[in-house]
Amino acid sequence: MTEVYTGKVVSKGIAIAPARKVALPPELVVPDHGIEDLKHEQVLFDKALAGARDYVSRWKATMNGRLEGEALELYDAYDEMLQDPELVIQTKDLIESSSKNAAHCFFRVTEDYATTLMALNDPYLSARSEDIRMLADLVIRLLSGQEIQELTWTDKAVIVSRQLTPQQLSSMNSDAIAGIVLVEGGLTDHTAILAQALSIPLLIGVSEQVLEIQNETPTLLDLEAGVFVVNPNTKQIHHAQEKLGVLQERFEQARLQATEKTVTKSGRSISVEANVGSLLEVKQAKANGADGIGLFRTELAFLQQKTLLSEQDHYDVYASILEGYEAVTHTIRLLDFGSDKPLSYLPVAKEENPAMGLRALRLGLKNYDLLLKPQIRALLRISKEFSIRILCPMIATEKDCIEIKSLIQYELKDLKTKGYKELKMPPFGIMVEVPNVAVNPKKFVDLADFFSFGTNDLAQFLMAADRSNVNLSIYFEDVKPTLIAIIEKFNSHAKRLGKAVSICGELAADTDFTEEFLDIGISSLSMAPSQIPIVKRRVREIK
Ligand code: PEP
Ligand code: MG
């Protein structure tokens, strides 16, 4: 029977594919019983370890091409842990001495180990203990025949789920995701941003009933029309296929022109840049004619990272991502972990209101040596090879601004004494995303070289409306005129001092507002790479 669901369209597009449900696997049960054949139990344990290694190597293969260097090497570390003689021998000894089943013994050994590592209060070792628990979970499920959540498939499917975290999404093969339908989620949370970046149609706020769908049920996700159709009829599929053809052709036409200069009819040049978080998006940005990276969300490049990053780790990631992209300027943002981008490689305390909590710059300053210092030094070093600007997230006060700028200047001075003599201070900019900054241009325009409006956070703080709560999405429509008025005022102050202002929140890609942005004096917009050709085409239509 055909069923139609509606919701909030986050990322447009059309998908015709079977449904596949993604849910958290049921909680692990560790069986605990005696055994008689000890040798046989040890053989079963070896088999489960080998099975777990197969999983790890499949995960690595899925990520190949999407992750690089250290991030990909994580899977080799998992593989080594599964062969760690200490864990393996201790488990086998425990099977012998206790006559208990392998799952129980492996759980005890790994838990002891993980607890000891946790107690050392070292962020690196805490992350290792999480890895060990994750691998133990896998081995125990294999030993006891419990469900293992496989998020890897190769044929295209529409994901149906209550929620999908940015981690889950970035750990999946995006080529196999035709579309996403969620009961919860936010218009501008980072799952939304990733889906847009990957050009995956995403519908959120769909009725709970959708979760009753059976895997492999045929579906049609038409987010041009804003509907999710379960068991569509042939006529509906045919119609959607035709629409998809037209859309693809229109996009291809816009893309063919995307690498040409973006000037209005009256000859005003507009810079249309890309928001990126991975090598894949940088490639897409280049292909879609981005005039540089307008916002590099560096934290997204490290969401899967399980260990602390050194200065060289940062350097290598940025160098590999920017390689071959020297001709234009790139704006690289300091780590903006926290809120819906939890930090995986440094445990942080749970907070009541993480979006307004110890996140971004605040978290970076509190853990300066571990988080910001290596990043800042790597960015300063890389500024020798690439034209970059450093952008700081979540500035709330003048003091925030002065403090981070002086830390960057300090690291620059220190690097110079250590042999990097010719380094210069790259342009320093701040995100305008906290109302105290947005409504006080006079106080802030002197303090930075450039400004980038983070309309996603600014909207949530102006409206006191959580950006990841679908029930509040109306506020993100209502706030638009206020945002435009604030940007206009800020820009007119900044212009007087010759400082550049751009917009990098999701609003930048809204073609209903392109003309208004240009009217209020904005000449630089940054957005998901997939939106660039469309916005460029819109700019060329404007007088
Ligand atoms: C914003 O807040 O608008 C922004 C661009 O940053 P992020 O979405 O990463 O918070
Ligand atoms: Mg933000």
Image (cartoon, helix red, strand yellow):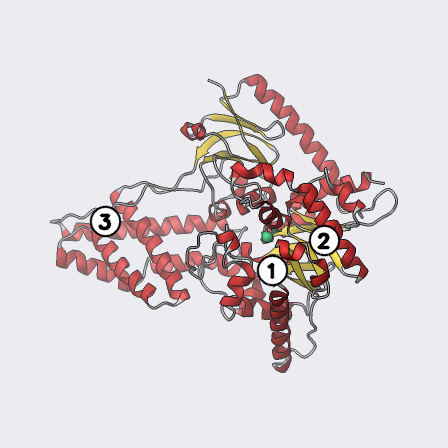
Observer-nearest of 268 and 351: 351
| Residue reaching furthest to the left | 36
Q: CA distance from mark 1 to mark 2?
A: 18 Å
Q: Which mark is residue 248?
A: none
Residue 109 position within the rendered picture, expressed as x and y whole percent measured from the top left:
24, 59
**Would residue 249 appear left or right of 90 to someone viewing this image?**
right
Q: Earlier in the sequence, mark 3 or mark 2?
A: 3
Q: Residues within 10 Å of mark 1 (few under 14, many from 20)?
A: some
Q: Could you tell me which residue is drawn at 61 percent across and 76 percent down?
A: 410
Disc 3, disc 2: CB below 8 Å?
Answer: no
Mark 1: which secondary structure?
A: loop
| Pointer 1 residue | 396
| Pointer 3 residue | 44
Residue 401 position within the rendered picture, expressed as x and y whole percent measured from the top left:
63, 66
Q: Amino acid at mark 2?
A: Ser
Observer-nearest of 353 and 101: 353
| Residue 272 in sight | no
Disc 1, disc 2: CB below 8 Å?
Answer: no
Q: Could you tell me which residue is drawn at 29 percent across and 45 percent down?
A: 28
Mark 2: which secondary structure?
A: strand
Observer-nearest of 241 and 134: 134
Q: Residues within 10 Å of mark 3 (few under 14, many from 20)?
A: some
Q: Which mark is residue 502?
A: 2
